[in-house]
Image: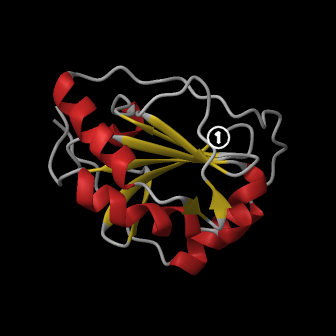
Amino acid sequence: MNFFPHRPLGLSALALLITVAGCSSADDSASAAVPSPGAGVTKLCRELDRVLPSKVDDQDRRDPEPASTLTAGWGDPAIILRCGVQRPSKMDDPEADGVEVDGVGWLLQKQDNGSFRFTTTLRKAYVEVTIPEDRTKNGMAPLVDLAPGIKKAIPEGIAD
């Protein structure tokens, strides 16, 4: 089993990386595929849903469709959180980009539509946060806002 060795980046460096990466966003709809994890991870994700903030990056919570305790959203275009996703294969890549924000490690993946996908590392459940291109100007603010809830609800360790 490979462990994802994340390389901490300074917030200003990562904010710059996100800001200068330019592509157009074609999908501003508030919808998200609902993950289907096992019972143990589902329980952790339900606890995370209970402790998530009402605002992320100064945006009000507006959950995507279909409604689920495994997904959450904030703003328009929406910052989308999905809990209980599968482990990204990119975590096997020793050259993959990672960042640690307030004690939570994240795999960083730029998407073709200009958004950024972050997936937690070394937690008992994988939590994915997608920040649309239109929201990347504030850099890591969404991850800073989400870190306390993730630390509280999703213990450190390796997801099954």
**Residue type of the residue flagged with mark 1:** Gln
59 over 118 or under it: above or below:
below
**Quadrant housing residue 88:** top left
Q: For the C terminus, give its image quadrant.
A: top left
Residue at 28 percent of width and 45 percent of height = 47
Q: Residue under circle 1? A: 111
The spot of residue 86 in percent (x, y) is 35, 28
Residue at 63 percent of width and 71 percent of height = 15
Is residue 18 shown left or right of residue 108? right
The spot of residue 123 in percent (x, y) is 23, 49
53 over 80 or under it: above or below:
below
148 over 89 or under it: above or below:
below
Is residue 135 shown left or right of residue 26? left
Residue at 61 percent of width and 26 percent of height = 65
Is residue 94 shown left or right of residue 144? left
**Quadrant housing residue 135:** bottom right
Residue at 36 percent of width and 55 percent of height = 51
Camera-side residue: 43 or 154?
A: 43
Residue 6 shows in the view: no
SS label for mark 1: loop
Q: How is the image coloured?
A: secondary structure
Q: For the N terminus, give its image quadrant.
A: top left
Camera-side residue: 127 or 56?
A: 56
Is residue 123 shown left or right of residue 8? left
